[in-house]
Amino acid sequence: MKKLSVILVLAIASFSSYAQSSYKEDVELVQSIYGKSKSDLVRQYMNLSDTQAAAFTKVYDNYEMERKTLGQNKLQLINDYASNYATLTDEKADELAKGTLKNNQDYEKLYSKTYGQAKKAIGAINAAKFIQLEVYLQTVIRNEIQESIPFIGELDKTKVKM
């Protein structure tokens, strides 16, 4: 569990620093740290036999490819929100909200699809174990992102009124 905590701290730190780097650098940093570290974490946590690990690798690699695309989309939405925060219109808020909702739905669809594939490859218990870990990791990351992004209008409340 200590290794899980260390990896999560690294993943969270990389997300927290996104505002200080350019968008392209952020995507590369997050995916390189999160992808590699996460791969090691998943392998250790799943503790599969060699046969199961071989069957799971293809499912996992496909999952990660799709997850990274969804992660890039999420970061684009965050960047778009940050760029438009001060001048947010109803139309832009609607676009961002719909984009975020779709991104969340796409993650859920990916979990379902991957569960089905993993279940065929390594059985229901191991597939559920993977999905449980993945949802946990994504929830922790999502929480950290939410904590670092101001709510709509939140920064206006900090301005001194005269």
Image (cartoon, rainbow, N blue to C red):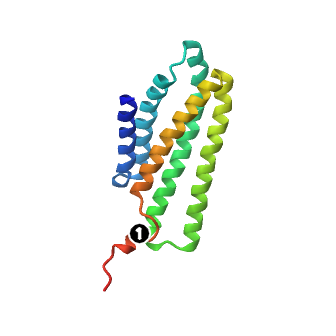
Which residue is rendered at x = 39% and y = 38% of the image? Answer: 8
Looking at the rendered structure, the secondary structure element under dot 1 is helix
Rendered position, 62 above or below 70: above
Rendered position, 89 above or below 104: below
In the rendered view of the protein, which quadrant contains the N terminus? top left
In the rendered view of the protein, which quadrant contains the C terminus? bottom left
Q: Position of residue 85 (x, y in %)?
A: 45, 68
Q: Position of residue 105 (x, y in %)?
A: 63, 49
Rendered position, 39 above or below 154: above
Rendered position, 43 above or below 95: above
- Whether residue 61 can be seen here: no
Q: Position of residue 143 (x, y in %)?
A: 45, 50
Which residue is rendered at x = 52% and y = 23% of the image? Answer: 46
Give left or right: position of 141 versus 98: left
> Label 1 is placed on what type of residue?
Glu
Kindly give the residue lying farthest to the bottom in the view shown: 162
Give left or right: position of 17 versus 146: left
Residue 48 appears in which quarter of the rendering?
A: top right
Kindly give the residue lying farthest to the top in the view shown: 50
Residue 109 appears in which quarter of the rendering?
A: top right
Which residue is rendered at x = 44% and y = 28% of the image? Answer: 41
Give left or right: position of 105 versus 3: right
Q: Position of residue 60 (x, y in %)?
A: 57, 29
- For label 1, the residue is 154
Which residue is rendered at x = 55% and y = 68% of the image? Answer: 92
Choose between 137 and 76: the one closer to the eye: 137
Mark 1 closeness class: few <14, some 14–19, many ≥20 residues within 10 Å = few
Give left or right: position of 27 versus 130: left
- Whether residue 55 can be seen here: yes
